[in-house]
Image (cartoon, helix red, strand yellow):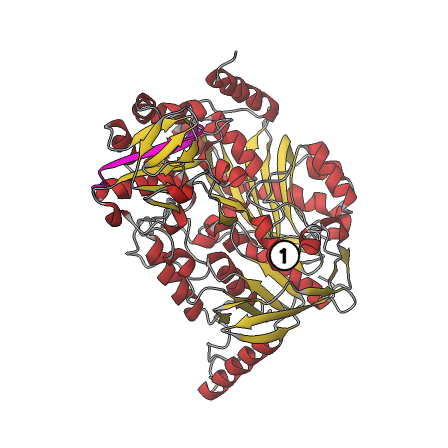
Amino acid sequence: MISRTERTSSFHRWYLSQRRFTPSLSPTAHDTMALDPHLLASEWLSRFTAAMKGTDISSVTDLLLHDGWLRDVLVFSWDIRSLEGRETIASYLQSSHFTEARVVDVRLNATTDLAPRIYNLPQLQAIGVEFAFTFDCRHGHARGYARLLRDTDGVYKALTLLTELSDLVGHEEVNTLLFEDDLSGNPNVAIPTKDLRSRSENWRQQVESDPHVLIVGGAQTGLQVAARFKQMQIPTLVIERDARIGDVWRKRYPSLVLHTPKGHHSFLYQPFPTNWPQFTAGRKLADWIEQYAFIQDLIVWTKTDFKEPPTHHPESQTWDVTVVRDGVEVKLRPAHIVLATGTSGRPNVPAVPNMERFRGQAMHSGRFPGGAAYAGKRVVVIGAGNSAIDICQDLVYHEADSVTMIQRSSTCVASRVYQLRAIGGAFPDDVPTEVSDFRAMAMPFALLKRLNIAVEPEAREFHEDMYEKLRNAGLKVHLGPEGQGLYILYLERGGGYWTDKGEAADMIADGRVQVRNGISPHRFTEQGVVFDDGTEIQADAVVFATGYTSIREVTKGIMGEDVINQTEEIFPGLDEEGELRGSYRPCGHPGLWFATGSFDHSRSMSKPLALQIKAIELGLLKHNGRRDGAVDGEPLSTL
């Protein structure tokens, strides 16, 4: 059998050969100095401009490496696509009638953070040039991002090309907080404060009585989408079933800390203060979310839920919705509903026989009250993911008598230092979040997965000391089934991994956290749990860190089974092109949208979602709810 290392090395060699470019095996200062980023970017853009004026698709695809990538966001079609290879890209452009995109006025972006620069791609042992540019197209104003590498003929061509619609003509995103800036069109004339207050109050009344969009879910995803919609002047109401905004985080176990650096989970329009901790505690995040809604003037109804599944009317393209707000029924008729209810369903607690006989406490990790309640107690944690290791650490900190983790199958484990190097490098503190998001958008997930696989041997070497300690203690570990790493595993599965904060591995190695592998609970006894291998562990408490059910079952309860059965599968998970499943684009039912993923996804993908809804409102786009059902309406103007 071929080992994973051998398979990865073979993949790396194949990938280099397929790319058909000349790698710099060890990029040197001389290699870097020999490149003129501005010149290379200008020359490539000149060829791009000429290709867009013509009708020959091959002149467009020739701008990319043979197996280069195009990620198109609403420019050549009203869809979000990630496409690999010249033939696939040519087929897409042909089917979308690329000449009708009318790409004009292509200009290099020379701003400080997006001007042409040299970049290093260590996974492919190569250096190249990356840059941003702007252009206009049939749908409106747009922007692009290209990463060039030299092919075997010495010509710089695109490894990746992003084309993204950024605004609709005459309906551009507002740059300042709506109704809070007293500047009029004349910089010497201020709008009276009373008029500002009146405008704000009128907007709130309009939204609360007749919202164009209803967002279900008032956590980070729903609120960031709502903030984007407000700046796009889309009347949007958010409903949240909890009593306070942020309660979804307050109710989690008290030791919860986000595992990504603050740059990654920053908020749209509102970055964290400079003295914000690198890794945010869950309860601190809850308070930030609450004040975010206040500062951004978002209209949120708490203690509000659907009375019954809404009804869609195709003839009027609206929904009949009845919500119960703090005990009072309210009827609404939005044109669109955005479900931002998270990626997890209900707590998944296995039906272990005789649970009622157990004299201790049995609970899901979502109800774990914190380690202090279990000082001197024997605790069994079923599961080996993020929640499980966090809870185990918390129990050790609070001097539980014993802590046993039950691992049913192998787990992807990555050190915080490694994650900080990878994610922190993509979202550095000295670069505006919107710039980092733009660059991240320009890297297709499917390509990122291959690049991660290519460097699995280096990642494994980095973790080897930690992995040895964990294996010796009985924990089975990996870097993803294909070596794709923790982040891609999150995108594909939404679970099955944890991040070591610096102490968890040591706790397992020295026995403060015992590990039992490959077993599952068979039945409870009065004093503990019997497992399927016949062994019994006595316990005072059992915590099921066993994840959550599919969000699809929850959405059926919200929207009704008939509606959800018409929709695509949704995130977690990537589609065949590597895009988030069923999210931020038509899902299969008209007027229904899903907003999912992590903080960075809702920051960046809220814009394309807003553009689609705005285009439908303006008649620029006609839609039946299916991805292949988009039809151009009347253009707003001739660019």
Quadrant in the picture for residue 242: bottom left
Decide if residue 562 is in sight here: yes
Question: Does 419 sit left or right of 506 as displayed?
Answer: right
Q: What residue type is labelled 1?
A: Trp
User: Residue 408's x, y, as percent?
Assistant: 43, 30
User: Residue 256's x, y, as percent?
Assistant: 34, 49
Q: Residue furthest top?
A: 1
Q: Which secondary structure type mostly characterizes the magenta part of the structure?
A: strand
Callout 1: 10 Å neighbours few (<14), some, many (20+)?
many
Quadrant in the picture for residue 324: bottom right
User: Residue 140's x, y, as percent?
Assistant: 67, 59
Verify whether residue 303 appears in magenta: no
Verify whether residue 410 appears in magenta: yes
Decide if residue 141 is in sight here: no
Q: Which of 214 and 607 is in front in this view?
A: 214
Question: Does 277 sit left or right of 101 as displayed?
Answer: left
Residue at 62% from the left image edge and 62% from the top image edge: 337
Residue at 48% from the left image edge and 69% from the top image edge: 303
- Give the residue number, with chain letter if any, for mark 1: 593
Question: For the C terminus, which image quadrant?
Answer: bottom right
Q: How many marks?
A: 1
User: Residue 449's x, y, as percent?
Assistant: 53, 33
What residue span does the magenta drawing correspond to?
399-414
Dot 1 lies on which element?
Answer: strand
Residue at 60% from the left image edge and 47% from the top image edge: 570
Up the image or down, 328 lies above or below 344; here it is below
Q: Nearer the viewer, residue 56 or 532?
A: 532
Quadrant in the picture for residue 316: bottom right
